Amino acid sequence: MSALELGALLSDPAQSGAYFVDVRDRETLEEAALALDFAVAAIDCAGCSDKDEILDRFAQALRFPDWFGANWDALEDCLGDLSWWPASGYVLLLDHIAAWRGADPEAFAILLDILNNVAAGWAEANVPFWAVIPMSAESLPDTQ
């Protein structure tokens, strides 16, 4: 996909959501988002072993306000607000999350649901919101 095509895709709120991508495409995605003047946050999930650590990584990377309650509902509330970080679009890069995904698939599924719900909410406001999950090609979920 060309940078122009990628920019057009990222600009479309109706396409927003949580997506697995090949880790080799991560840099291009980040560059395309920055070229659109989107807010971009890299969330380093390396070494996370539980939900609390994931929530803490989100809070640190996105500089959540003091009222963040460090639970799933509070994560959804903060991601759906982002008033402290105004932007025309958002891209979250969930780096190194494969180990946590394998260790706690139920919590990972909850996180994906939250990210997709938040993206749908932002789409209603006509704001693109992307959660990109870069993984090695062999770790990508089978979509067939």
Image (cartoon, rainbow, N blue to C red):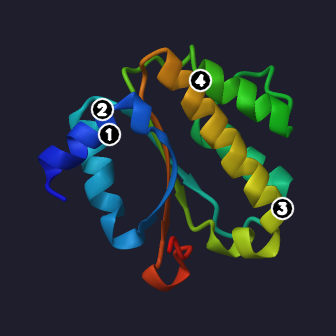
Q: Are marks 2 and 1 in contact (CB under 8 Å)?
A: yes
Q: Is residue 131 visible?
A: yes
Disc 3 from disc 4: Cα separation: 23 Å
| Mark positioned earlier in the residue sequence (2 or 3) | 2
Crowd around label 1: few <14 · some 14–19 · many ≥20 (10 Å): many
Mark number for residue 11? 2
| Mark positioned earlier in the residue sequence (4 or 1) | 1
Residue at figure coordinates x 28%, y 41% from the top left? 9
Identify residue type, mark 3: Glu
Could you say where residue 108 lies in the image, as x and y percent from the top left? 74, 59
Q: Are marks 3 and 4 in contact (CB under 8 Å)?
A: no
Q: Which residue is mark 3?
A: 106
Taking 97 as reference, is 5 left or right? left
Mark number for residue 115? none
Q: Which residue is mark 4?
A: 121
Could you say where residue 142 lies in the image, as x and y percent from the top left? 54, 76
Q: Which residue is mark 1?
A: 10
